[in-house]
Structures are given as structure tokens and as C-alpha cells.
Image: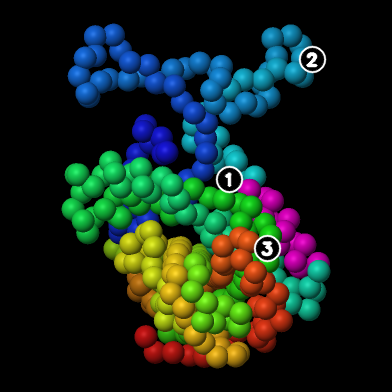
Amino acid sequence: MPSPINSLGLGFRRSIKPDVVYRSGKQIFLEKPGNTHERAILRVSPTSLSPGQRAASPGRLAGDLSATRHSRGTSNATALTSRIAAQMCSVLYDLRRDSPEEAIGEQYIPVLLKALTVHSASWGETQEILENLLKPISQPRKLKENINRFLGYGPISPNRVYSCTDQRATLIGCSAITHDEGHLYSVPLPPSLSGQKLWRRLIITLAWFTPINPSHRAYRKAALWFDPPKDELLVDRQEADWQAVKRGTVQHEILEGEKAAPFVEDQALEILVNCRADAGDLSETIPYAIAVTLEVAEGIDISIYNEIQTRIRPPVSVRPRAI
């Protein structure tokens, strides 16, 4: 659950903020004496004892290297998330070394880390808890937006992007784009999934870095977006509001479905990354990264990873496009 002492989103122009959340230790709250009503006043316990996250600390004696203490808070979550990004960076450099002919440009490593960090995020079990709490006080059309205020795109699960499994394949891409351009990405569909009535999930994350225009009310000069393909796999949007995901500098879409979706050999999902000027003229090229994951439930006898790997297309086609 999110910390009750944190401020709540949304971000600039009602964009999704926070982008993600991560564990920061359990916090004890103490009730003030005399509270007898539902709106009790609580105070934070300042203890350095359990519970919380245990880490090394200065010892009482000089040279003592065994001392530890418990702490909790957003600083902990920030440090742990930075560590996850560093581990992802090692994975990306391994990919550069293993595939020199398709090496990831050094200039795209930061934006790839941004995309991959968000790519593993999901509301998970916390969604049901917050829905039960917020439904009585939220308009139906505002429920998802209110959950976004607490969770953003949700807690991250880094193990999902460190590596693939037989039932889960993740593809990444990166490039630079400018105003009125469109970059088309083609993701091959695994033939064994055709016509199968089983659960499947498609996750697409687009992240970019934009220059700013402080004299314009929109502030961010570049807006990138894509429309997720739904018909090929008969999947529907889940979690975050479909309009809110396009207001920031990360678009994170989760789509799920269980209906049988027939498709032909060599059919592919097509994802068009678009760019438009959003705060005055845009002459700069905008670095971006995209991550796409297709998965079925673990234990299903369909090797998503191998079937996609053998059908990977040549590099992305780029074409100018009027918006």
C-alpha cells in the first residue's frame, strides 16, 4: 500500500504521477491518547527498530562494521529503484556486447532505463483494496484516476524485465523522432497462440525525453503516443485510464484477454509511434524507447519466446506522417 503521509498525484496537466511506486519499509503509527472516533489522529513512530528495511549504519564503537538499523520512507524506495535501474543497465550492456551488429546506441541507454523501469509496473492486488476504499467516494468515471493518484502505474516487479521465459517475451526498441514523423514497429505473433482460448497479456511501454518551452503553458515541447493494437489478440485495456496515459512522458498500456483469436502465419502486431509538437515549434529530434511484452500463463505449453525470436523482423521502418 502507498504511504499515507505522501502527497497524492496527479502531475502536470493531470498526467500520471507518481510514475511507479516501490517498497520502502513498514511504518508504525501511534495513536494519540484520547482518540475515540474513526478519524483518529496518528503520529509516526521514530524508532530505528523493526519493522522496516534493515541496512548498515554507523556503530557505537569506532571500527564497528556490524551495526545495522531499520528505516523506512521514500528515500529508501528511491535508493532501491536506482539500484534496479543500475542492474537493468548491466543487462543492456550485456545485450550490446552479445549483439554488436544490433548494438544499442549509448545515447539511448537512459531512456531505455526509463521505459523498462515502468514496463514491469502493475496495480496488482492493491487495485482491489483501493477500489473497495474509493468506490463509495468516487464517481465511476473518476475511479481509475483516483487510483492513479495513489499508485501511478503501480509497484514495479524488476524480475519481469531482467529476463524472459518460455511463456513471456519482451522486445525493446529505441530511436529518435521529430514532429510529424511516425515509426512503425512490427511484433510477430506466435502461431501456436492462434485460435487458443486462454489468458494472454500484452504490455507496451513508450518513454521519451522532451525539451521544454517555459514560456508556453503546455511546457513540454514533444508529445509521443501510440494506439495499442487490440483486435489481433482480442485484448482489452486494463488499469490506468486510457486518456491519462497520454498526458506525460511515459505511456504504459496493459491489455488482457481470454477469447480465442485466430490469425494467419506471419501476422504481426503493428505499433505506430507518433510525434507532434505540443508547446510551440519542435525542431529537435526526440530520443525514445519502447518495450513490448507478450505473455501467457506460466505452465502453458506454448513457447512464446522461441516462436517470436525466430520471426523477428528487420529494423523498424520510418516514414514521415501527417498528424
Residue that label 2 marks:
63
The mark that comes first in sequence, 3 or 2, is 2
Q: Quadrant of residue 215?
A: bottom left
In this orientation, does residue 105 appear? no
- Residue 272 is situated, as x and y percent measured from the top left of the image, at 48, 82
Residue that label 1 marks:
81
At a point 18% along the width and 53% down the height, the residue shown is 139
Of tags 1 and 3, the one toward the viewer is: 3
Q: Quadrant of residue 234?
A: bottom left
Task: Name which residue type carries label 1.
Answer: Thr
Magenta portion: prevailing SS class: helix
Of tags 2 and 1, the one toward the viewer is: 1
Report helix, strand or loop for mark 2. Answer: loop
User: Label 2: few (<14), some or many (≥20) within 10 Å?
Assistant: few
**Disc assigned to residue 66:** none
Residue that label 3 marks:
165
Q: Is residue 260 above or below residue 29?
A: below
Report helix, strand or loop for mark 1. Answer: helix
The mark that comes first in sequence, 2 or 1, is 2
Please state the extent of the stretch shown in magenta in the rendering. Answer: 84-97
